[in-house]
Image: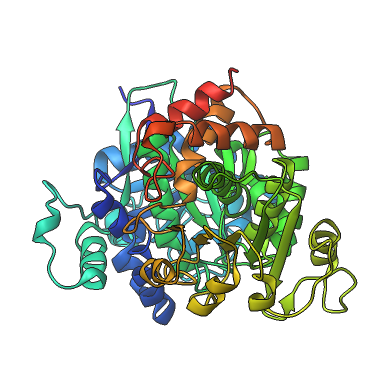
Amino acid sequence: MYKTIEYVPKIEPTSSQILSLIYTPGVGHACMKIKENDGLSYVYTNRENSVAVISFEYEKSLKRAIFLKSTLNIDAYPLECKKEFLKLVIENIYPNFCGIDLTIIADEVKDIQFEVEIPVLKSPHPNPPPQGGREIPTPPIDIKEFFMPFSKNIFNFNINQLEGNFEQQSLSLREKAGGVVETKLSENQDNCLPVAIVSDGSAVLGFGNIGAAAAIPVMEGKAVIFKYLGGVDAISLCLKTQNPQEIITIVQALEKSFSGVNLEDICAPKCFDIEKALVERLNIPVFHDDQHGTAIVVLAALLNALELADKKIEDVKIVISGAGAAAQAVSKLLLSAGAKNIVHTNRKGIVVEGDENNDFYLEKLAQITNRGKIKGGLQDALKCADIFIGLSTAGVLKPEFIKEMKQKPIIFALANPTPEIMPDEALKEGAFIVATGRSDFDNQINNSLAFPGLFKSLIVNKINKVTDQIKLKCAIAIASLIKKEDLTAINILPNALDPRVPHAIINSFNN
């Protein structure tokens, strides 16, 4: 007898080539297609077969979701919602689904009008009898006709069957499979609740504010990695609202549906306030992966790069292009690890304390970086720098800027899908080590190395707060998997699909 639902990949990322199609850089092509026409979210994601089953008790939602999956092959997502926030929740989670099933709470919702663009099933019967009136039997609604779900998959997937260039292959893969995730019925009663991957689509990859529907391919890709590498179930929850307080309220209202919350692709500075509020209010772990996952993997890569360059973190000058959520988190973790000389740049130039353009968070960052209070642009910042870390936009690092740096310059160009400088250009100008966020280049620095094992550890150990000590342990665990004799300029981190990584992180929690 089925006891629960798992959230599983339609195509497992068994190679770097498949990973590059499912996640980065391939995922970006689907995002941009959906940005142009949000109706394409039914084509390039699993939305066409996804139905949210909502009630005020998770077990009731789960039972209904198992029924829909077992009888109609609908990927039904059980959710428990606080009653007073039901309307707000439904009107903001609907971009993920082809329909909402509220039949469990039919009496409570019969008079509520939901402003959504998908069907909402309030009752299994079309015409419930009037109160006190004679009951007239009516046939149950045909759920297939009501929601019009359509399940797709690729069986015996063969990457060589995909035709065209890389963009065409990435889009074809999603179109044929209907996204990259689906549900699976399970007899495993011990299976944990899923992690919610929550985004408002305001800072997706390097594309910026492209909205909820266009963000779904990224969240589905992360769900694949969660399950494949960490054995953690995860679901995409892209919210229509971009109001910080509404995001906080929605996640709080759904808390009992999840074992953790992975915040994703929410722009700064509101992401700081959202994370802080949820960490304080929820009894499950909350982790903004763009910030802290990035910081962990950057530190891991830097520890090994510095070993190769024969430099110490406390002695080097680090320039970070960008001052958003990820850049600020990286800076703070590097300082915790011993760095002393960090300079940030953004679109307006070098970030300096007291600048009238600084908001509250940027001023706080300026107070702990750029202690020499230098001014100018990125080229000025890179004079005599040892390390460039790009968390900004494509093409901002000009080849000639590398000549301003010290010997053995280390370049981490992490903008996705197009880095601040392409690796071949950087190497041509004398870069000692080059890393990007992409799986189709050497030295991929990507959050996927951190978040599967980290969330598994948090859930298993029932830890609700992610401290700097935990992040440092994770970074060291990842870096230590590359033995000194195997450390080279093109091998500073484990492969994104290395199964040892989540285990190393899990073990670090016990040390």
Total numbered labels: 0
The quarter of the rendered structure image containing the C terminus is: top right
Residue at the image position 63 percent from the left and 53 percent from the top: 291
Front residue of 215/368: it is 368
Q: How is the image coloured?
A: rainbow
Residue 259 visible? The answer is no
Residue 184: % across, % down: 30, 37
Residue at the image position 25 percent from the left and 53 percent from the top: 18
Residue at the image position 30 percent from the left and 44 percent from the top: 9
Front residue of 75/36: it is 36
The quarter of the rendered structure image containing the N terminus is: top left
264 in relation to 5, above or below:
below
Of all residues, the one furthest to the top in this rendering is: 510
Of all residues, the one furthest to the right in this rendering is: 354
Residue 504 visible? The answer is yes
Residue 271: % across, % down: 69, 59
Instruction: Describe residue 317's horizontal placement relative to residue 231 as left or right.
Output: right
Front residue of 4/279: it is 279
Of all residues, the one furthest to the front in this rendering is: 407
Residue 300: % across, % down: 54, 42
Instruction: Describe residue 315's horizontal placement relative to residue 506 as left or right.
Output: right
Residue at the image position 47 percent from the left and 38 percent from the top: 452
Residue 457: % across, % down: 54, 28
